[in-house]
Image (cartoon, helix red, strand yellow):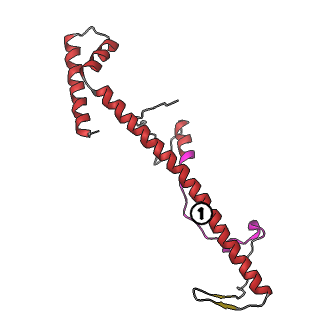
Amino acid sequence: MNPHSLDHEVSTHLMLRERLREAFPDADDDDLQDTLEGLTNLPEMLAALLRSQLDDLSLVEALKGRIGDMRARLARLEQRVATKREIAASVMERAEIKNITEPDFTASFSVSGPKVLVTCEDEIPSQYWKPQDPKLDRLALAAMLKAGEAVPGAVLTNGSPFISVRTK
């Protein structure tokens, strides 16, 4: 669908609506709307646009599902990689094999240095914590503004137009 043809059709629709209101000032809105639907292609063009939007939405949902499946597969493969590496390290340690040299890779076994294991975060002194930048709690801010509270630096705006399309 060409945006210019939609703009043209909207302009035609608005011009015809104004002419009809001038010619028939006593006509009710339903009659006026029925007449306009017969004079322009705007309803059909909007229907085609919304069908296209629904098609795109179906693709988005399908891709989200596919991405979810692929992420799950990736996680399984990453776990398999880690498990195989752990098995190889365990066997090399038990068999006291320090190096394996093959045409396509070389593996070396060693023991890493000690690692930190946190047993209770609440007991760790504050000097070991990194300060973080504050993050705005938009939900709490919106709740206060909707409750009629004045919050410096923030206001509620008018809602933006939206369209609801039901398919079920």
Question: For residue 123, what is the image quadrant?
Answer: bottom right
Question: For residue 88, what is the image quadrant?
Answer: bottom right
Category of crowding for the residue at label 1, using alpha-carbon neighbours closer than 10 angstroms: few (below 14), some (14–19), many (at least 20): few
Percent across and percent down for residue 152 are: 48, 47
| Residue type at numbered disc 1 | Leu
Is residue 135 located in the magenta-colored stretch of the structure? yes
Q: Is residue 129 above or below residue 28?
A: below
Q: Is residue 7 above or below residue 119?
A: above
Residue depicted at 26% across the width and 34% down the height: 6
Nearest the viewer among 95 and 35 is 95
Residue depicted at 70% across the width and 72% down the height: 83
* Left or right: 10 as drawn, with respect to 113: left
Q: Is residue 7 above or below residue 139?
A: above
Nearest the viewer among 62 and 158 is 62
Percent across and percent down for residue 24 are: 23, 10
Identify the magenta region.
Answer: 119-140
Q: Which residue is mark 1?
A: 74
Asked whether residue 162 appears in the rendered view, the answer is yes
Is residue 126 located in the magenta-colored stretch of the structure? yes
